[in-house]
Amino acid sequence: MQKHAIPPARFFTQVSNDIIRHPRLSAEAVRLLMWQLSLPGDVDQPLSETAKRAGIKKTAFQRAKQELIAEGYVHEWRGQGAHGRWATRQLVSNVPLSAEEALVARDGDRPAEPPTAVEPTAVEPTAVEPATGEPEGRSVGRSQENTEGNTQNPPSQPSPSSPLIERGALALSSVSHRERQLRLTGREVTGLAPLAAEWFLRGASLTDLREALTLGLPERVHSAAALVRDRLTRKLPPMPSFAEQRVQETPAAEPRVASMRECRGEHVQPRLFRPVAEETLCPACRREQAAETATTTTRRRLIPLPHG
């Protein structure tokens, strides 16, 4: 086969053959990455908008984005700005970057900032969290038809020493053990445990968490950790209302059965009774036992003694 290629004199983008021939990136992922890299440096355009312009549908875009995240070409950080607006800051690179290398590329020579301190210069804006007593006004700007990455309430990240994090780690380990497509390493479980703990903090059950992670899985999962992080963030349940929190915080009255004990006497069906001290028999069995003892004593008194 002959090739005839004329190098463009202007308006071109240098793309590595590693991207074009990448064995794990789909055609949509390569197209999305090349479109984003071809944008001028002063254009701050989110990946979702690029996908629309490139003709990539929503489902294909989600899959392509996860592939790019898994391979290190895309990195994201959620943060809250000075005005309380939560946003997702994205970094797109033409070479794969580790998490540490991405932070260096994002911040330059400055010390790496935690994700919660990122200024809202990122793309993919999310819903504004209104302050108490203030009206919920519509945010200025275009409507966000693509809600990718949005959550109604940003994660509050429980304390690392919280028992909820241990519960979250156990839940993720259980899902990883049962679901072959979601196998996680110990380090990945530790890193994702705070997100899982946030679910429990908001009143979700283990079943809720497991179903959110396992239902509707794609046929091929390129990165289990990236998929789990995306679902834990995107499907995060809303924070319960004040009334629901009061119900959760109010300790439930001790059930009556908790202070009762099963009788050790002979019964056709188990019988529970409330002991006064350390009794092991119910009142009926104690009365029956006392009656038998009295009858035995009386019989002994009536037996004639032999005469010598």
Image (cartoon, rainbow, N blue to C red):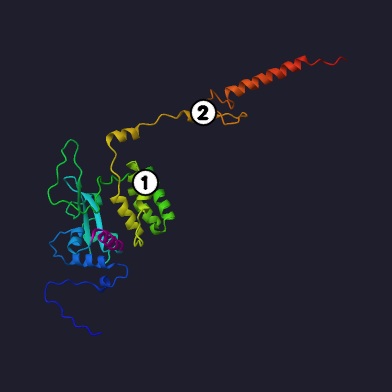
Q: Which residues are magenta?
A: 57-70
Q: Which residue in the structure is indicated by mark 2? A: 260
Q: Which amino acid is tagged 2?
A: Met
Residue appearing at x 11%, y 74% in the figure: 10
Q: Nearer the viewer, residue 205 or 85?
A: 205
Closer to the camera: disc 2 or disc 1?
1
Q: Which residue in the structure is indicated by mark 1? A: 208
Tell me: 117 left or right of 170. left
Q: Is residue 169 magenta?
A: no
Q: Is residue 62 magenta?
A: yes
Could you tell me which secondary element the residue under label 1 belongs to? helix
How many residues crowd mark 2 within 10 Å: few (<14), some (14–19), many (20+)? some
Could you tell me which secondary element the residue under label 2 belongs to? loop
Answer yes or no: is residue 114 visible: no
Q: Tell me the quadrant of the picture where the C terminus can be found.
A: top right
Tell me: 211 left or right of 133. right
Q: Nearer the viewer, residue 14 or 213?
A: 213
